[in-house]
Amino acid sequence: MKRDVIFGLHAVEKFIKQSPEAIYSLSFEKGKLNKRQQSLFDQAKSLGLSPQLIAKSAFNALDGTHQGVMAEVAKQKDLTESDLPAILEKADQPLFVFLDEVQDPHNLGAILRTADAVGVDAVIIPKHQSVGMNATVRKVACGAAESVKLIVVSNLVRTMKEMQQQGMWLTGLAGETDQTIYTQDFKGSVGIVMGAEGSGLRRLTREACDHIAAIPMTGVVESLNVSVATAVTLYEVFRQRNNL
C-alpha cells in the first residue's frame, strides 16, 4: 500500500486522534523531548504504536518546520468527481470551494484549515497544474487535511458546470468588478471559485461563474494572497448563514 509522510506536532496529533490505525511508523528527534513531544510519545505508546527516537539528520529532507516529529501513514484514497453526488446529497446547504490551479502547498494547507473551521463540504482542485496533498499541505492544514474532503477532478470547468446543473450558484473572486462579496447572497447551494497565485481566474473558469465579486481594498496592494482571500470570503459566507 502507498504511504505518505506527515510532520509537525499539530498535524501528527490530529492524525493520531483521528486515524491511529493508519500509522505505520512514528519518529521523534533523538534527544530530550519537550513536554508536548513527550505527551504525544506517551499517547502513541498507549495506543499500541511503537514510537522511535532517530537522528536529527533523518528530518533534513522535510520541507518545512517538523518540530521533531514525523509519521509514515497510509496514503488516503483520492476523492474524485464520482464522490460529489454523495457529498451534495448529505449537505443541507452545500458549500464548495473550487481552486483554479493553486500551486503553493502552504496556500492549499491554509485554505483547508479555514474550510474546516467554517464547515466547507468539499474543496475541489484540478488534477493538473495544481498542488495536491503532500506533507507540507498536511503540516499547514493542522489536521484539516484529514477532515475536509479534497476532490481531484480531471476538468475543473466541467465539474463547475455539473454542479450548476445540480442547483449550485458559483461566485468567482476577482478585482475587476463593482460587486463585492458583501453584496452577494451566500445562502443555499454555493460554490466559491478562487484563482491561482498571481494570474487569478483563467478565462474559461471565470466565464463559468454565475457571479464575479471582489473583496473591497483601500491600500496600495492590488490583491490579497489566495488563502487570505479565501478565508475572508468564507467567513462572509459563514456570517450570512449564521445570521451574525
Image (cartoon, rainbow, N blue to C red):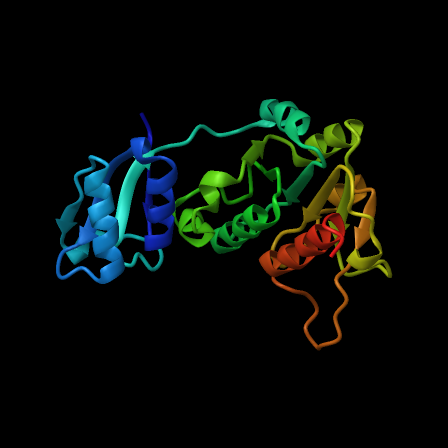
For the point 38% across and 45% down, the residue is 14
* Closest to the observer, 227 or 23: 23
Q: Is residue 43 left or right of residue 220?
A: left
The residue drawn where x is 26% and y is 50% is 40
Which residue appears farthest toward the right when viewing the image?
Answer: 178
Residue 37: image location, x then y, percent: 24, 56
Relative vertical location of residue 46 with respect to residue 235 in this rendering, above or below: above
Residue plotted at (30% across, 53% down):
62
Query: Which image quadrant is residue 188 in?
Result: top right
Quarter placement of the C terminus? bottom right
- Spot occupied by residue 158 in the image (x, y as percentages of width and height): 71, 30
236 left or right of 146? Answer: right
User: Which is nearer the eye, 230 or 36?
Assistant: 36
Q: Is residue 8 left or right of residue 138?
A: left
Residue 127: in sight, yes or no?
no
Q: Nearer the viewer, residue 19 or 60?
A: 19
Measuring from the top left, give residue 64's x and y in whole percent.
35, 58
Q: Is residue 235 above or below residue 166?
A: below
Quadrant (top left, top right, bottom left, bottom right) of the N terminus: top left
Q: Residue at x 39, y 38 (%)?
A: 18
Is residue 165 visible in the rendered structure shown here?
A: yes
> Where, by quadrant of the figure, is residue 74 drawn?
top left
